[in-house]
Image (cartoon, helix red, strand yellow):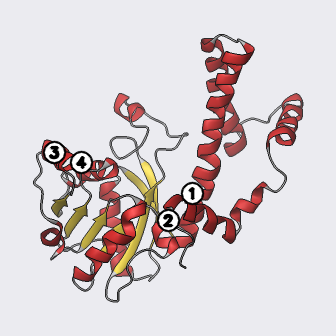
Amino acid sequence: MTTLTRPTTVALIGAGGKMGMRVSNNLKKSDFTVFYSEASPAGQERVRGLGLDITPTDEAIVDADVVILAVPDVVLGAVSEDVVPKLKDGAIVLTLDPAAAYAGLLFARDGIEYVCAHPCHPSVFLERRTDEEYADTFGGIAAPQEVVAAIESGDETARVLAESVISTIYAPVIQVHWVTVKQLAVLEPTLVETIACMIGELLQEALDETVNTVGVPYEAARAMLWGHVGIALTNALRGSNPFSDACHIAMDYGRESIIKDDWKKIFDDSELDYVIARMLKIDAVKR
């Protein structure tokens, strides 16, 4: 892989938000020249609490090589309309979620590169060796994680520069995987939010039902569920051990009772468009 050798100036817009603070924490440890921009007074106080200065957006972006838009998806379109026309040619605009890019909401302009990068979060199978790694369930602090990113132009110089910033803001990073914007949108939301996060919440509902309706003591139900979630994941995703014949019968009953026969329709383009439009609170994607 080509390595980055020249100095880099980064502007972080939304530095005091939920994701912005995570990014700010890692950027302040880097060798980049960084300008931190935040509109809300509460966010500004959080940034200053890190010992960082606030720079007005127009000043922060004037000479930036990479501009990170760490703002909610629902305002990314409006923010990009304000910021992107003011950027120098060759600048990279880095967003942290694919929904707005996929929906065609980002301001279009020649002479810049759009990159999107989303963290995978530390794997459930990660071998954690320290208390800090165990505590870092989200990633970006101590537990290593992988990242998936998209750049449609294929420009190698821009990709190398973007990857150096991506590896910094989500550090420690094991690897950055490069895909298309559409593929990244299929990963998030379809694979991990529509499916994985939904199943995680369903497991909590099942635990509540076991305790509150059936009457199983909470500690016993939790112990049984948490342990079996671990073995279910390692058996199904890694093939560590085969499920028993009796377990397969119960699993088949679960599919018949819970899963719709046509559930794979969520991978259709029309369904992806539908859910992203709902997430962004727009009538339809513009792609």
First-in-chain label (2 vs 3): 3
Place of residue 277 in the rendered image (x, y in percent of width and height, measured from the top left): 56, 65
Point out the tag, 1 or 3, that comes first from the N-terminus.
3
Q: Residues within 10 Å of mark 4 (few under 14, many from 20)?
A: some
Distance, label 4 to label 1, CA atoms, is 26 Å
Residue 24 appears in the figure: yes
Give the foreground label among 1 and 3. 3
Point 15% across, 45% down: residue: 45
As displayed, is residue 217 above or below residue 272? above
To which residue does mark 2 refer? 99
Q: Residue at x 15, y 76 (%)?
A: 62
Does label 2 or label 1 sit earlier along the sequence? 2
Decide if residue 2 is in sight here: no
Q: Which residue is mark 4?
A: 25
Distance (Cα) linking label 2 and label 1 = 8 Å
Q: Amino acid at mark 3?
A: Glu
Residue positioned 87% across, 39% down in the render: 252
**Quadrant for the C terminus in the image:** bottom right
On screen, residue 91 versus residue 234, left or right, reads left
Q: Which residue is mark 3?
A: 45
Residue 134's place in the image compared with 179, above or below, is above
Amino acid, disc 1: Pro
Residue shown at the point (23%, 55%) measured from the top left: 27
Between the residue at mark 2 and the residue at mark 4, the CA separation in whole angstroms equals: 25 Å
Decide which of 151, 3 is in the foreground and name it.
151
The residue under label 4 is which amino acid type?
Asn
> Decide: marks 2, 1 in contact (CB < 8 A)?
yes
Instruction: Give the quadrant of residue 176.
Output: bottom left
